[in-house]
Image: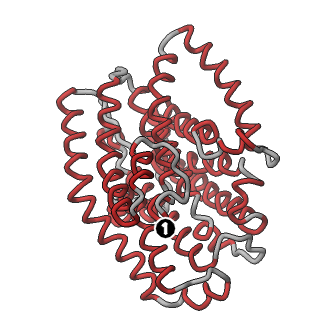
Amino acid sequence: MTDDRHDRLSECESLRGIAITLVFFYHFLGSLRGYAPDPHAHFATALLFGGSTGVDLFFVLSGFLLSLPFFRGSPLALGQFFGNRALRILPMYYLVVLVGAAWGGGWQTALHAAVFQNIGLAAMGSFGIVWWSLVVEVQFYLALPILVWLARQRWGRMVIVAVLACLCFCYLKIASPTAAGFWAAQRNSLLGRWPQFAVGIAAAWLHHRHGAALRGMDGKRRLWLGTLAALGALVLLDAITLRGLRLFGVSQFVHWYKHYLYLSILWAVFLIAVIDLQPAFRKLVVNPLLHRIGLWSYSIYLWHAVFIVMLVLRLNIQPSDTQLAEYLPNFMLFIYMAGATLLVSATTYQLVEKPFLRLKRNRFLRIGQVREDAM
């Protein structure tokens, strides 16, 4: 009999809460200090100042949650799969695109954004800062059913091995600090980010094949193993982020691109530790507050940069260490940025996301397939 708690994997909602919290602080603190290298970056705050790794966690979770139903035997129903992906991401995304176009008048850009084309970090100003990751997500949605279909054919597995070898070659070209032209342009595409989804898929396989054995271990042994694995992953995540901050800042995207892969592997370890091994500090990372933030995480992700950039422009903040020291103690500044983001995100979750999520959930119940859920 299936363990319903683990079938639904509610822990992943809290992990989404952690991911979006890291992303928010990355942009909040970056708006005050900037994203230049910081030789004096501190170990205790590295994950917050380098919180773009929250996107890595989102990609790992997406690979994990979307592939898990197929490991459990879900049939490859393309209409169901793409229909539910559309219900999950399009309504909220199109709302933000429309608001951005109405605000700045970029209707031509909005048309391109609607089909996930030609979206750069500067698309519609602050509205489009995070859209690049949705493009990568959509590319993954298109690729996953092909991967599943091939994996279920005996000859298809040989094709996967050959394709994987080609992808590894491409990744090495893209991750090279000397990458230019075509290869450099692929860093924010599935061709450059596929290892992060692959790590999530590997974690899903591990959870499916060995999760029951891990959960069935002696309580004390499981507690110690889970605590060491989760804590070790967090320490190494912080250490890698600290190195990137001290040496490269945001330019680690160019000079140390492979660090995204290292971070993703550690997030996968942390994910398995939290879900299957339940570390001693589990309640700090799986709790009602993070669960609620996780529920709102998609709306928060799409709105947070808008409010941060608006306030930065209004206050005419020129990011620097001096500005960070001046504004960071200003609690009301944080309240405005975080409060406005949470208020609008909670509202759009209730009015826009939730009705479509309910429809998505009902479609699963009506069709009777294995449960699937992702960002």
Is residue 272 among what the camera can see?
no
Give the percent coordinates (x, y) of residue 301. Answer: 43, 60
Q: Quadrant of residue 373?
A: top left
Could you tell me which residue is drawn at 44 percent across and 45 percent down? 112
Its colouring scheme is secondary structure
Q: Is residue 356 above or below residue 42?
A: above
Foreground pick, 348 / 225:
348
> What's the residue type where badge 1 is placed?
Phe
Give the percent coordinates (x, y) of residue 193. Answer: 60, 42
The answer to whether 348 appears left or right of 275 in the picture is: left
The answer to whether 276 appears left or right of 317 in the picture is: left
Give the percent coordinates (x, y) of residue 158. Answer: 62, 13
Q: Residue furthest top?
A: 155
Could you tell me which residue is drawn at 62 percent across and 45 percent down? 265
User: In the rendered image, which residue does mark 1 sit on?
Assistant: 24
The answer to whether 60 appears left or right of 66 in the picture is: right
Q: Residue furthest right?
A: 178
Quadrant in the picture for the N terminus? top left
Is residue 156 among what the camera can see?
yes
